[in-house]
Image: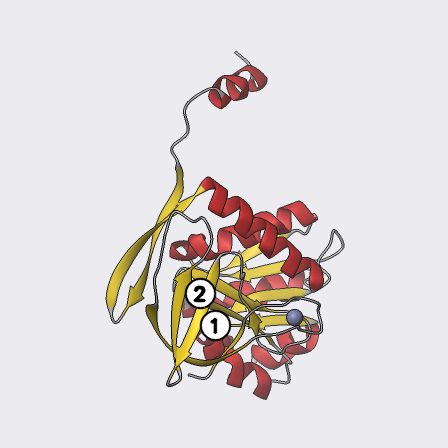
């Protein structure tokens, strides 16, 4: 038995139709959702295009600030980074792990932080300003934006939208949603999400518990489709 023979044998085994199961909330109630292998493949391709637009390649260094329960949203980003040849580290989203993001950013040639949330931004304390000065591109969650901006960053938005992820391109004119998979509606400032792609999880006008504005039309990056700005 060798690694090659074991890998070849494993490839013949039946694979479960799902890559994973995760959870988001609608009106305070948990919604469990399934992710198929095909969903993950398409999400990875989309994430790869977004990261490439931000200039990530084999010369870049990336920190992805995400938690283990957020794999449904951020695992495709990790895989996309691998495909682009970009070395990455995971900076966790807990305050006591903020030092991890600071340590990687100070000791490694990091060119992007993706997904910093308010907890980590606050946990960095006085280190936030020097980190912002050192790292050229910072993707922040909506709740971290005021702190990042005050620290001197010009962050782009990374936000979860129920089961979806939206990411702002370098033009920073609203976070792009993958329009082949999802559609947003805004009513009285509240955001609602529906599935439009062939996904394992079919959401229909799910209330996200988020307020924001939705715009459509061509972005300077060339993408069309919906962009969202979270307002609170
Ligand atoms: Zn754009």
Number of marks in picture: 2
Residue beneath label 1, please? 117
Of the four image quadrants, the one with ligand 1 is bottom right
Instruction: Where is residue 135? Give x, y as percent.
Output: 68, 71
Instruction: Where is residue 2? Give x, y as percent.
Output: 56, 15
- Return the disc, 2 or 1, that comes first in the chain's sequence: 2
Q: Residue furthest right?
A: 59
Q: Is residue 134 found left or right of 31 in the rendered image?
A: right
Instruction: Where is residue 38? Give x, y as percent.
Output: 49, 42
Q: Residue at x 47, y 53 (%)?
A: 197
Q: Is residue 166 found left or right of 188 in the rendered image?
A: right
Residue beneath label 2, please? 93
Q: Residues within 10 Å of mark 1 (few under 14, many from 20)?
A: many
Q: Secondary structure at mark 1?
A: loop
The quarter of the rendered structure image containing the C terminus is: bottom left
Q: Is residue 204 visible?
A: yes
Near-viewer residue (153 or 172): 172
């Amino acid at each position: 038995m060798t690694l090659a023979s074991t890998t070849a044998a494993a490839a013949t085994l039946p694979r479960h139709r799902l890559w994973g199961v995760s959870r988001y909330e609608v009106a305070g109630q948990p919604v469990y959702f399934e992710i198929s292998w095909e969903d993950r493949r398409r999400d990875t391709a989309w994430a790869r295009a977004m990261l490439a637009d931000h200039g990530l390649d084999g010369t870049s260094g990336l920190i992805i600030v995400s938690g283990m329960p957020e794999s449904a949203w951020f695992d495709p980003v990790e895989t996309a980074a691998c495909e682009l040849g970009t070395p990455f580290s995971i900076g966790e989203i807990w305050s006591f792990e903020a030092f991890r993001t600071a340590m990687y950013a100070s000791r490694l040639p990091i060119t992007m932080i993706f997904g910093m949330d308010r907890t980590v931004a606050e946990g960095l304390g006085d280190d936030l300003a020097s980190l912002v000065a050192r790292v050229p591109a910072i993707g922040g969650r909506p709740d971290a934006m005021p702190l990042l901006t005050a620290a001197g960053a010009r962050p782009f938005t990374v936000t979860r939208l129920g089961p979806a992820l939206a990411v702002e391109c370098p033009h920073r004119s609203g976070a792009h949603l993958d329009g082949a998979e999802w559609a947003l509606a805004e009513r009285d400032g509240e955001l609602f999400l529906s599935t439009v792609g062939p996904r394992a999880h079919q959401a229909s006008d799910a209330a996200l518990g988020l307020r924001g504005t939705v715009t459509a039309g061509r972005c300077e990056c060339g993408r069309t489709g919906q962009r969202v700005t979270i307002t609170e």
